[in-house]
Image (tube, rainbow, N blue to C red):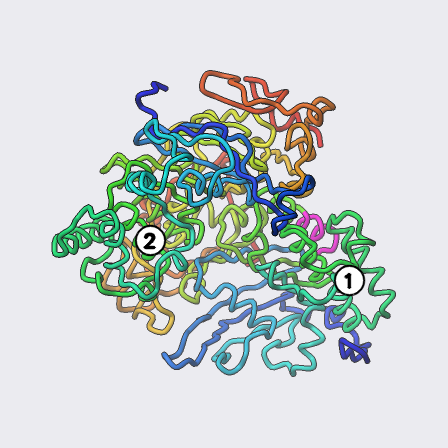
Amino acid sequence: MFGLGLKKRNKTDLRDTPIPEGHHLLEVNDLKMYFHTQDGVVKAVNGVSYTLDRGETLGVVGESGSGKSVTSLTIMGLIDMPPGKVEGGDVLYRGKSLINMSEAELEGVRGNDIAMIFQDPMTSLNPVYTIGRQLSEGMRLHKGMSKKEAMDRSIELLRMVGIPNAEQRVKEYPHEFSGGMRQRVMIAMALACEPDILIADEPTTALDVTIQAQIIELMQELQHKNGNAIIMITHDLGVVADIADKIMVMYAGSPVEFGSALEIFYEPMHPYTWGLNRSIPKQVQDEKQPLTPIKGNPPSLVDLPDGCPFSPRCPYATDLCRTQKPPTHTTKTGHYSKCHYSNDEQFVRANAPKVERIKPGDIASERGVDA
Amino acid sequence: MADSNVLLRVEHLCKDFPVDKGFLAKHSKNARYVHAVNDVSFDIAAGETFGLVGESGCGKSTTGRCIMRLTEPTGGKVLFEGKNIAEMDKKALKSMRREMQFIFQDPYASLNPRMTIGEIISEPMVIHNTVPDKAERIDFVRELLDTVGLNPEHINRYPHEFSGGQRQRVGIARAFALRPKLIICDEPVSALDVSIQAQVLNLLTDLQKEFGTAYLFIAHDLSVVQHISDRVAVMYLGNMMEFSDWKTLYNEPCHPYTQSLLSAVPIPDPDIQGKRERIILRGDPPSPIDPPSGCPFHTRCPIAQAKCSQEKPELREVLPNHYCACHFAEPNPIKESSIEL
């Protein structure tokens, strides 16, 4: 066929298979993705685990190089191998392993059951094809729609994401769209096949705050309507506070803390989470508080420190931290932290940032975490 | 503010960029211009931090560049210690630039990859011949490196050997090499991770305390600007919309644009986030080539009325030292929840 080289696929979608008992919509189990480079082995993702259910939003927070994007690219099967290699662990979507899936099978999942919004709306669209054609591509491939059907659906999608004059806009090229509009097109494209899981990799980082607010509102609205799960990758704690149910804090390729949004913000256990919290300027009423930065720089992923990866920058680090990998300390609600001292309640209480809540209450009962 | 204290005064600054290239296009009656900066006035006192916020394309960076004449302003005055920079000749400009330095946004592009950081930091001193003796200069650079938190032993290293945060420290050391009275910081922390961003913000605050330098701090991140600034101005489509001391601006914003901007900032606190009413603006900012008539914000404003599209509101003093360009701005702010969308 001309152009897209599409093979019509009329397979049943994986999303129609029920989730096997004892499984979640998405399970990531101790995933390890290493890159074999000339300089050595880059341990970009080093033991990431989490679960995700329908309608849930997971926020993944971390600095650049913490492995948050590579984790989701691995889930999507978008890492070039070599140099990348899955060194361990598994990703189960509805109980089926995505890691062992054949490329052909994976193609049926990617962009269909699991879709991704990329960070940079300026470079993620193809400049030589019209918006309509780029939107149609996925639907023709996955849903076997005709050109006409796909184009009609594209117009509908553009309307849904709030682009005025959609009939006209669908025929235009990416350069005719502003940054916020392009990001809307990216969202429309990701939602074209009504995915089960929407992965958003810093979807609002390149945008202004007023546009960011529009995009986040839109993603929440659509989630409410479609019941899909969202993985929101960001470095902005404000954005995750806005939309996440659960939060995973990543550092140097592995999660250091995981819990409900309320737990991460009001009862954080890991010194890195505390450090992040103290680093961001707060909106204050009267007196400004000085910032307490985390000293030093993140470690090289080629040469990770022995023991806890955060120990060189941690103000509380002891010899134990510098020599031994920290165990995972998990609470009743499933809130976990990888720190030698997280189980020492006194230590946590004495050093965690004091946050006064507007409505004090028992976090665990307020928003139950499935443990 | 007492006039004697004013270090920099900007009066009716304008900058238009021609859209069409070529002699004929430029001189035709229908020549089109991007009105990047439109009649902007403010002043900065010695030793204070003046924050300039706004969305991309609002003209905040162009304002900064016009002040240093990195871009030629098309109208208005820039008075530095009473002397008009906009009319200076090259020689006067050079000596003026000794007093005024720039910190750039991109720590990767603003350092010459072929120079060692020692050469980069000492270059302003060579150009302005402030420290003629080479050995003395090297000592001074080592001292500066120590001040900005870099290892003085790294004086002979090249920029690529440093991380983003460290490079920004090099840029800061270079700006401070001449002990200027004013530093224009154009998005100095927006390329950095939060933990590094806090380090650089603290460094800037400490250096200001030590040397009494004034900052013009340009950024799009409202929380960062609030943290560092004494006074804050909000720009939209090249126009100054509101300015005041930080406390008033953040707690009692008068202008509907400032209000919606503040309400759009996500606050890292789920309780507050779930509770507060947010004003979500519709659409994108209009094009600065063809700005709306009247108030530039009326196309997106939640409280716009007929008057707004006809008459451009002047910047007026709604409260002492609190200026706002809106026909309907009241000293008592419109409550977020009372705005119907």
Q: Chain of mark 2?
A: A
Is residue B115 shown above or below A262? Answer: below
Q: Quadrant of residue A129?
A: bottom right
Is residue A108 shown above or below B181? Answer: below
Q: Residue at x 69, y 25 (%)?
A: B308
Q: Where does the magenta region start and end?
A: A218-228
**B188 left or right, relative to B19:** left
Tell me, yes or no, whether the two marked residues, 2 and 1, touch with CB atoms within 8 Å.
no
Q: Residue at x 20, y 53 (%)?
A: B141
Q: Position of residue B66 (x, y in %)?
A: 45, 40
Q: Which residue is mark 1?
A: A132
Q: Earlier in the sequence, mark 2 or mark 1?
A: 1
- Element under disc 2: loop
Q: Quadrant of the C terminus of chain A?
A: bottom right
- Residue A222 in magenta stretch: yes
- Element under disc 1: helix
Q: Which residue is mark 2?
A: A344
Q: Could you tell me the amino acid type at mark 1?
A: Gly
Q: Could you tell me the amino acid type at mark 2?
A: Asp
Q: Quadrant of the N terminus of chain A?
A: bottom right
> Quick one: label 2, few (<14), some, or many (20+) residues within 10 Å?
few
